Image: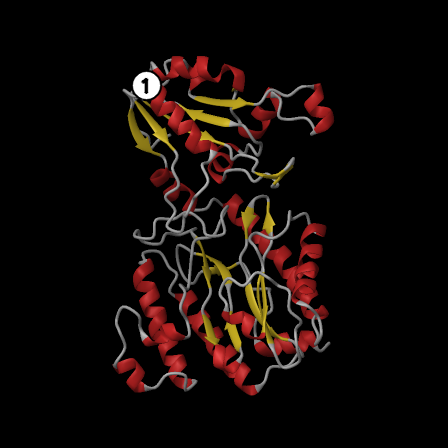
Amino acid sequence: MAQMKPSSLAVFNSNDIYPISADSTMPFQQHRDIFYLSGVDQEESILVLFPDAPKENHREILFLKETNEHIAIWEGEKLTKEAAFKTSGIKTVYWLQDLEKVMFELMTQCDTVYINTNEHYRASVETETREDRFTKWLKDKYPAHAVAKSNPILQRLRSVKDQIEIDLIQQACTITEKGFRRVLNFTKPGVWEYEIEAEFMHEFLINRSKGFAYTPIIGSGNNANVLHYIENNQQCKDGELILIDAAAEYANYSSDMTRTIPVSGKFSQRQKDVYNAVNRVKNEATKMLVPGTDWAEYHKEVGKIMTSELLGLKLLDKADVENENPDWPAYKKYFMHGTSHHLGLDTHDYGILTEPMQANMVFTVEPGIYIPDEGFGIRLEDDVVIQEHGEPLNLMKNIPIEAEEIEDLMNK
C-alpha cells in the first residue's frame, strides 16, 4: 500500500478451481499474490486495498463466498467473517454478493485502479484466469479510471523474504532431505523411476507437506539429458545414474532440489569426475550470490567456471573456446540452462532480474553437465539465502551431496 499512487485502489483475486471433464476438477491452488498479501487460501476470494479510502474501514477489504450449512456438510465449512479476520488481520469482510454495490462506492472515490497481471519472465498463459475476467469486467464498467500495474510492486516485495518465509522454505528443505535419505536407502538396480517418486511422496505426506513443489523429474540413464523429463516410467539399470529433481512444498512455499545418484550405489571413475566438476561449479557459483550481484553478469561468470571444468574433462578443447559464438558459448553444448532462479511461494519465484540481488532473496544454484554420448547427465541443486555479509546461507546444507557420502549412505 505504501508504494501505490495517491487516490488508488488495488484488487487481487483467487484462482479458479479448474475443470478436467465431467464433474472432475484439479486440486485447488491459491493464487500466490492474494495468499501472500492476506493468508487467505480459499477459492472465490477477493482482496481490495484502498489506502486513501474516505471510510477507514474500507482501506482493507476481503470479499468471500458466503458459507452455509449445505456447504459445510458437502465441502467443509468455508471462512466465516471471524475466521477471515483471524487469518488475515482484515476487519472488513463482505460476502461476494455485495461486491458490485461496494465496488461502485469505492470506484467513485478513487482515480486509479491497480490490476494484477502476470509479468513473470517465464509466464506463458493460455487460460483466461479469474483475475483476467475480473479485470475485463472492471475496465468495461469503469472506463474513465487510470489503470496501473500491481506486478512490479509484488515482484519487488515477494522477492525479498521475511524471516517467517525463510523458516517455511527451510522446513520444506528439511522434508525434502527426509525424502532423499529414504530414496538413498531404497534405490538399487531394477527399481523403477516411479517407485522412487512414490518413496518421496510417502515421506513428504507423512511430514505434513501437500506433496511435490513442482512436477518431479526422476531421470535414469539418458533420460537425465531431457531437461524436463517427467514420464518417470523407466527401469533403473546397473551402471546408470539417476538425476532426481524433486522437492517438497510446505505451507505453499517451495523447495527445489536436484541430486544425481548411481543406481548401483557406486559411481564409475568417469561419472565421479563429471559429478565432482559439477559440484565445484555449484560451490563457486554459490559464493557469487551476494548483495549487488547482477543476475546476467553472474551467469557469464558461472559460464567461465564451467568452461574451465569442461576443458579439464576433455569435453571441450581450446579451439572450441577460441572459436565460440559469444551469443551461445561453447560450454552451452553441455550446460544449456541457467544456474539460478528466485525461489519462494512459486518454484520459479517473483523477482526482477534486471535489478541487483539483495539480502534475504532466496535463489537456487543448479549447474549441470549433460553428455548424451556417454549415457548420463548430472545436475546438482541447492537453495540458498543471500546474506547481508558473507556467503549465502545454504538451506540444503544437511542434504547429502558429496559423491563419497552418497556412496556410503547407499551401501550402508
Residue 139 in the image: state x and y as whole percent. 34, 24
Tell me the quarter of the picture where residue 176 sits: bottom right
Q: Is residue 255 above or below residue 77?
A: below
Question: Which image quarter holds the N terminus?
Answer: top left
Residue 275 in the image: state x and y as whole percent. 52, 77
* Mark 1, residue position: 110
Point 59% across, 50% down: residue: 249
Residue 141 in the image: state x and y as whole percent. 36, 19
The type of residue carrying mark 1 is Cys
Tell me the quarter of the picture where residue 115 sits: top left
Q: Secondary structure at mark 1?
A: loop
Q: Is residue 267 visible?
A: yes
Q: Nearer the viewer, residue 5 or 212?
A: 212
Point 72% across, 51% down: residue: 206
Q: Residues within 10 Å of mark 1 (few under 14, many from 20)?
A: some
Q: Is residue 274 above or below residue 169?
A: below
